[in-house]
Amino acid sequence: MGEGTDQSEHKSQSLEDAKHENGKDHTTVEGADEDNSGEMRRRLGNSKKELVESEVEEAKSLKEKDDYRYDIVLWMFGMLFFSVLIALIFGIGAERGWDALSPYHMSNNSKARFLPEPFTPEPGVYKRSDSEASGRWYYWKLKPEDTTAWTRLFVWASYCFHNLSVWLVLYLQHKAKNIPDKDGQYSPKFSNGVDRYNLIMFGLNTFFHLLHLLNTHTTYDGTAADTSIASSQSSVIVALIVMVMIEFRDRGILFGYPTPNQLRRHQNSIWMSPVYVMRKYHGYFIYWAAIYTFWYHPMENTVGHAFGFAHTWFFMLQGSLTFTKFHLNKYWRLILETWVTIHSLIIAAQTGSGVMGKELWPMFVFGFATVIFLTQLYGLTFWRDVPSWSRSIPVALYVVIVVFTYSFVKDTEGRRFTRISEIIRIPGIYYLIVLVAWLVIVAIVKIQKKKDAKTLPSPNDSNKSLNIGKKGVSQLPLWKEVVFLCFFVLTYLVCVFISWIFEYLDLKVNLIVLTMVYSFAFTLIAAIGGSFFLKPLLPMSPYIVPPMNK
């Protein structure tokens, strides 16, 4: 019995020892597991931290890339290119002995190249037979006997290829920006970057500027040989009027009124539709106006031509910067609108000094400047941060300058102040055409709205009923797209045809009257072209009104 007890105690001790050993081993395993788990957590934490840091660095890198102003770089290259071009124009012209500054003071070199302006009517002579012929005559063009089929073909082919090529690229860019993905999401429209379309348009515009320089020093003539000077002037005037309509939402029409806050309550009104239509499709008309005027004039080495080509280049450079943030820069856009004031001063001083016993520059300078101080100046953003009464300050200063200047400006009889009323002529044309264009577009939109009410599905219809294609937009058959594009181009061919036929028929009409006729005609044609032929291709959503700027 004792032995059994000893054996039992021995077994019990053995079991205790085994339990202790097992417990020790188990504790060791658990400790090891805890150490491994902690190490894994530390490694996982470090990995997550490294991943987050990597993502932050990548996001920072992308932000820096997005923040880099490629649009400003392209603009700077544009200004550099134009500076080189101007140097070439003056350098080559001087080398050839060109000095045709004015038709009023012709050198022997100029007499060999051009006909003088018909200041005195020449009965029976084509385009030179009436008292208004001088106003309609463009001085910088070849003599009729020097004009050939080749001189015409070179410039007209260049003009057509220039206009059609940039239109095509602009249209493709618009399509790319207006096509949502399958989820209905659009890419950001305006950025600091430039896309391939911007670069292609920039390249095309620079190429055709160099080609025009070659044209000037080979065949010489621009399209001025066949079209009216009034058409060139009118195309630019209407382009500037289009800009007045584009900016209406942000600066109103007079002294910054109506303000954006006042207009916001009317943003769904059909009377605001011209603003949205012009903002959507203005690029096509402004491109046409700039290119048409650009090819009208030869690259003569005069200051007046240089400032004129600067203006058309600015428009084309702005067109090459579509959908970039620099395209929206208010100060740059103000330069685009007001450059004509400087240009008109230089042209009037260069070609019209002392004409008919009076200086012509005050009418042009103060005419365009009146539009600046009534309308264009108030698009700058700082006006939103100053009291509204401060808008009267520049107007008061302008009135003082006008009165002071006209105290020295005399009419043909030597009287002072009698010509001061001439400063309302240009603003009168501006605002009258704005009104006509506004009413025309409202009328077109009303017609389309009635038609769309019968054909458009409701906004709640499914994508299937809306015929949403793979790219997330209603697709027209290719043949219809081509037909609409052809009709769109045809509307502008009508503009060119009108310019040619009026010149060909040698209409005995005053230059100012002819300019107004062209301006109204171009306005109507541009409204029709955009509203009827571009809208089906690049539709404006009937259910979404663009947001107003605060």
Image: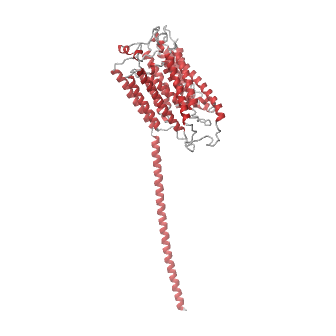
Quarter holding the N terminus is bottom right
- Image spot of residue 52 (x, y percent): 48, 52
Marks counted in the figure total 0
Q: Is residue 483 left or right of residue 450?
A: left
Q: Nearer the viewer, residue 112 or 519?
A: 112
Task: Determine whether 346 is above or below 118 in the image.
Answer: below
Q: Residue at x 64, y 29 (%)?
A: 447
Q: Residue at x 53, y 27 (%)?
A: 490
Q: Is residue 249 visible?
A: no
- Image spot of residue 527 (x, y percent): 57, 27
Q: Residue at x 50, y 23 (%)?
A: 496
Q: Residue at x 53, y 33 (%)?
A: 482
Q: Residue furthest bottom?
A: 1
Quarter holding the C terminus is top right
- Image spot of residue 509 (x, y percent): 52, 13
Q: Nearer the viewer, residue 417 or 93?
A: 93
Task: Determine whether 74 is above or below 300 in the image.
Answer: below
Q: Is residue 100 visible?
A: yes
- Image spot of residue 409 (x, y percent): 48, 13
Q: How is the image coloured?
A: secondary structure
Q: Nearer the viewer, residue 9 or 51?
A: 51
Q: Nearer the viewer, residue 220 or 544?
A: 220
